Image: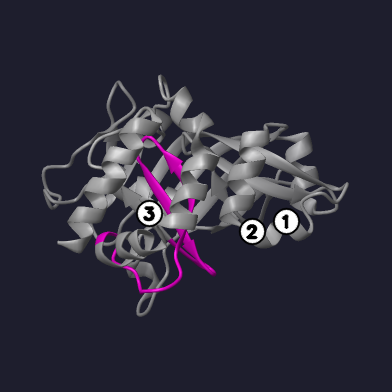
Amino acid sequence: MMIDKDGGPVRDPRQDPSFDPVGESKRLLRGIRTATLATLTEAGAPFATLTAIATDHDGTPILLLSRLAHHTRNLERDGRCSLLLPQGGRGDPMAHPRLTLVARAARSQSPGARARFLARNPKAQLYADFPDFSFWRAEVEAAHLNGGFARAADFGPAALLTDIGGAESLLAAEADILGHMNADHADALALYAEKLAGVKPGNWRASGIDPEGLDLICGDETARVAFPTPIKNPAESREVLVELAKLARG
């Protein structure tokens, strides 16, 4: 699949018209918590490893890396990297969707990036403050989706990432929104996960919110609830979360 002048995919008329490559890619980006990270060695050879991942409000991947690791030293020398986010599941692994990102990584001192990562990966709080660990943002330069047979697409970052312009009040209120939902509306979160995201019942908690959706975690499981339309502020978040609860109960 080709890329149009705005960085979005150009649809192949032979593909299933129900195939939504951007929507599927956003789901994988926001829903997967473990990715393969490929970096470049000093000799220029590819070096792949496994790493935990979270996303910033706009969808940019966030990593927590130790300087003792080969891949971190590779990134310090050359920030070019690739991330593979596979859905996995039963049956033929090649039949499940996976998203490949081409990116350029750099250290981040953003408190927001730290908070987003630790909310998504709470076990990482045990070592996040070790002196050799640091947070990194992997700025996406290109994306490739393999959604299974005859379901592939290539596109630029503008199509994949979330526009957070004008959503400053929503992002600033994220901790309060999540705290309120987790403390007072655990039943609604469980309904979102089971009825709207289609995952198993459990003690689901909200780990992040952005203009396009709500991220949920339950142990090592994750779920993503996409909003019907983007939101920009806390008032709109309350409205959409109430409407989604009504929809889930219905």
Residue visible at 41% across and 63% down in the picture:
87
Mark pair 2, 1: CA separation: 6 Å
- The quadrant in which the C terminus is found is bottom left
Three-letter amino acid code at the position of disc 2 = Pro
Mark with earlier residue (2, 3): 2
Q: Which residue is mark 2?
A: 122
- Secondary structure under tag 2 reads helix
- Secondary structure under tag 1 reads helix
Three-letter amino acid code at the position of disc 1 = Gln
* Residue 191 horizontal/vertical position (percent): 30, 64
How would you rate the neighbour count of disc 3 (Cα within 10 Å): few for under 14, some for 14-19, many for 20 or more? many
Q: In the image, is 193 to the left or to the right of 49?
A: left
Mark with earlier residue (3, 1): 1
How would you rate the neighbour count of disc 2 (Cα within 10 Å): few for under 14, some for 14-19, many for 20 or more? some
- Secondary structure under tag 3 reads strand
Q: Which residue is mark 1?
A: 125
Residue 248 drawn above or below residue 4 = below
Answer whether residue 128 is visible to the viewer in this image.
yes
Q: Which residue is mark 3?
A: 224
Q: Residue at the far right: name it.
A: 131
Where on the picture, by quarter, is residue 89?
bottom left
Mark sitting on residue 179: none
Please name whichever residue, 219 or 92, is drawn nearer the observer in this view of the structure. 219
Mark pair 3, 1: CA separation: 22 Å
- CB contact under 8 Å: marks 2 and 1: yes
Residue visible at 31% across and 59% down in the picture:
192
Please name whichever residue, 209 or 8, is drawn nearer the observer in this view of the structure. 209
